[in-house]
Amino acid sequence: MVMDWSERFSPYGRRAKASEIRELLKLLDQPDIISFAGGIPDPKLFPRQLMADVHAEIFADEALSNQALQYSVSEGYGPLRDLLVAEMKSLGITCTKDNIVITNGSQQGLDLLGRLFIGPDDKVLVARPTYLGLLQAFTASGPTYGDIAALTGPAPVRAKLAYAMPDFQNPSGETMTLAEREALLEGARRSDLMVIEDTAYNKLSFDGPLLPSLMELDIAREGDIENSRVIYCGTFSKSVVPGLRVGWIVAATPIVQKLVLMKQASDLHTSTLAQMTLAKVMECLPAHHADTLCDTYRPRRDAMVQALEEFMPEGVTFTRPGGGMFIWVELPEGFDGAALLARAIAEERVAFVPGSAFYATQPKLNTLRLSFSATAPEKIREGIRRLGALIAREHNGMSRAATA
Ligand SMILES: Cc1ncc(COP(=O)(O)O)c(C=O)c1O
């Protein structure tokens, strides 16, 4: 007899589904493919020597290494939270250590927030398109989804919370203007919603300083973080390294206290060694590290925008991001990103992520996400040239079929 395991899973477990895209990305790890698929940092930018020095320093000291290898508190390593209080202050957000919980990457932060706030049939407002990992984290809780654009309409929206990425959004690369940020917050107040602000890419600002965060704007209006409806998710993944899995949440104290209890139940705490390492890295990393990241990624963004302008046939539109790792492409109606990917791999050895994965509902099939972060400019140009040629061939074929 074959066991029917699905019968035994809880409703929460049953709703957890594999992402076709994540499965697909596993297949793209072949050296002759020019991949614009994964949104990953360039490992050449990892501060490897500093990491080695910091680990050596910790392990040369008996008391420090005992602490690094020991269990620790669920809210996170105190000195790291102190440094994050200062970091948040530099971003215009006044908070105390009690407003911060350290998480295993911001992905765990999103998962804990989903479980804290979302029950079956609660409505969550997200952008079209939005971050795939947010959908994975929240969908197991059984919400319905709505379009965050509804928040800025005249009528209040019945929903539990909204999720937004104001800077260099994944997947679109777009940044919200100051007026759009104010309007989103105004809508959230009118409809009495919480707002999760995901800042994963905010250190990768290529063309100038960041606009104020949603949390900064909301605190300026409400007077205090304890009255803010914004929950801020931060991460070291794009600014230092993703492999240590360290992120943080900043929020009103009652929310943080609840998250700490959930974190305790989930994994007791984030790796003490990883947190100590990042605290030391934050103290020692030269202030110009973010400039080094931007100086590497900016020419890649430029190369991709330029190549798209040069090689994409008429009818294809794309974003021109001011930072982050992604460009969003819209193809003429009738294209299907997933079908195009199969041909792009087989015929041109180029990969990207079909855009449909980034929609909570009613996916737009004629969209693609391209990442420029891990590919050198010359290779980006060659990959976009090949992709442009394929799209032009396909487009001509579609036009011929339509006129036949
Ligand atoms: C928008 C966004 N949020 C959160 C994450 C999760 O990052 P991490 O868990 O590494 O902090 C990612 C990762 O790519 C992301 O793109």
Image (tube, helix red, strand yellow):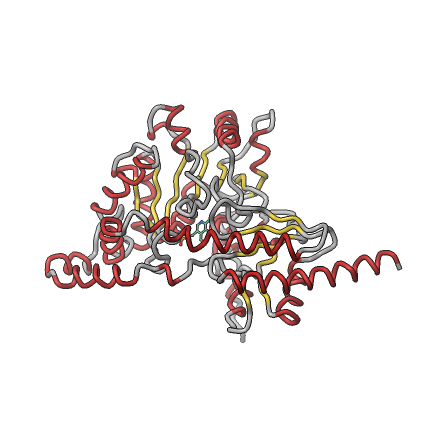
Q: Is residue 322 above or below residue 1?
A: above
> Where residue 45 sits: x, y (%)?
37, 59
Relative image position of residue 397 (x, y in whole percent): 79, 62
Q: Residue at x 57, y 52 (%)?
A: 305
Q: Is residue 364 left or right of residue 28?
A: right
Residue 103, horizontal then vertical, whole percent: 33, 50
Count of numbered badges drawn on the protein: 0
User: Which residue is the extreme one toward the right?
Assistant: 404
Left or right, 60 with respect to 318, comes to left
Q: Quadrant of residue 344?
A: bottom right
Query: Quadrant where the N terminus lies?
Result: bottom right
Residue 298 in the image, given as x and y percentages of width and height? 47, 51
Residue at x-position 21% and y-position 56%: 71
Image height check: is 252 above or below 283?
above
Which residue is farthest left? 62
- Residue at the outermost bottom position: 1
The quadrant holding residue 394 is bottom right
Which quadrant: the C terminus?
bottom right
User: Camera-side residue: 310 or 9?
Assistant: 310
Q: Nearer the viewer, residue 61 or 298?
A: 298
Side (left or right) of 315 relative to 358: right
Relative horizontal placement of residue 361, taking residue 214 as reference (left or right): right
Image quadrant in which you'd find residue 37: bottom right
